[in-house]
Structure formats: C-alpha cells, structure tokens
Image (spheres, helix red, strand yellow):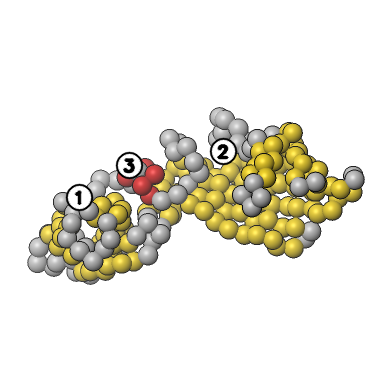
Amino acid sequence: MDGMYIPNGGIDIPYSDAENLLQYPVTYNTSYTDNFACTIMGYDRHGSVSVVADGYGTLIMPYGTVTNVLRVKASETYADYMSGVAVTNYTSVNYYWYKVGIRNNLFQLSTLNSNGSLYQQYGLYIDGTHVGINEISDKQSSFDCYPNPATDIITMELLQTSTSNKNNIIVSDLSGKELIKQELNQFSNKTEIDISSLSSGIYFMKLLCDDKVEIKKIVKK
C-alpha cells in the first residue's frame, strides 16, 4: 500500500513507508513482518503488520465451492501520534483467501479495534463471474443448461442418472439470493425453467440432486 485517498475533502495520503500487504511467492506457512508510516490529517501514523499464510483448503461461497484456496492472515498494530504522544491506538485482524490464477482475493474478513473497542467489522467477496467455472468445480458436470444466454425459457438437462425423486433447481442472483426454485421433471431428464421475470444479467443455476450440489452460470438476455 503506497497511499490512501479520502473522497470527503479530496485528501491524498502518500505513505512515507509503504505497507507490504502480500509478498510473492506465498505458500502455506509463509510469514513476515513489515513496518509502515504516513501522515494523516495532521497525525503521524506508524506501526507494523504481521502476515502469515495460516491455512489452505476449500472455500464455500454463495455461488459454489472453490478448491485449493490459501488463507492469509494480516495483523496490524499502529497508532496516530500528535507531538510524539499516541492519541489513538489501532489493532486489526484481516483474513484474505486467495486462489492461483485470480489476481484479487476471493474473500476478505476484517475487524478493526480503536482504543480497545470494536470500530469496524466487514466482509467482502468477488462474484463467481471472476472466479470461472473451471475453478469452481473440478468434477465432471452432471447437468447442462441451454440456450445460454436465454430470453424466456432455459432448459436444464440431466447428464447423469439420478437416484432421488426429490431434486430441485434454484436460480439465484450474484449475491446468492434465491429468485426461482423448481422441482426437476420426474418423467424426463429435461426440465424447463421460466426466467422471463428476471432482469437482464448474470445468474447462477444450482442443481440439488442426490445430496450433491452443482452450480452453473447462466445469462438472461
């Protein structure tokens, strides 16, 4: 991080000592500590960040499951000083989940404390369109959907035989909100879903079949 910008007032804050948020290459158990400093609205801010890649595995997202993900934990301790006296002390813990081939982190969970009290807590994630279908699932697909893009009707076709008679299709938006829920046609391997009520855009079709879940991206014209 070389600097910050505060839109309210148009304040530019260049760092006199940049903060190293992530070193490359990075793998499980990679760790380091870095100091950083800047002057912000009349206060001298400086501190350090300790970073460790502390976990790896599978990340379950609203749009599906992403495999081979690395978790990086960044713990910051810093303070704002006025005339050499610490006015405000901060501690933050930030978790980032990364996957090879994707430039940004998939998911971020951050907690910031100011003078010992919770100041801010939030989570961020990128939607599935930036992850890609190949990263979401490595297994052989059990269904297909067409036409894609579609205008009014999209057909879901089972490519593998189901042993259950209680299979559902769910269409959701990029935030994971369910918009359409429909049972599979028990007498055919094809089921038609009416998406005419949806606005143009990108959605996810989720198949819940034989206690398994598979997701595909669909586009409404």
Front tag of 2 and 1:
1
Q: Which residue is mark 3?
A: 134
Residue 93 percent across, percent down from the top left: 66, 51
For mark 2, give the secondary structure. Answer: loop
Reading the chain from its start, which is encountered first: label 3 or label 2?
2
Q: Is residue 15 left or right of residue 60?
A: right
Q: Which residue is mark 1?
A: 148
Residue 28: mark? 2
Residue drawn at 38 percent across, 49 percent down: 128
Residue drawn at 41 percent across, 51 percent down: 127
Could you tell me the amino acid type at mark 2?
Tyr
In this view, the residue farthest toward the front is 9
For mark 3, give the secondary structure. Answer: helix
Residue 32 percent across, percent down from the top left: 68, 35
Residue drawn at 15 percent across, 60 percent down: 153
Q: How far apart, in angstroms, are the residues tagged by discs 3 and 2?
A: 23 Å
Front tag of 1 and 3:
1
Are dots 1 and 3 in contact, CB under 8 Å?
no
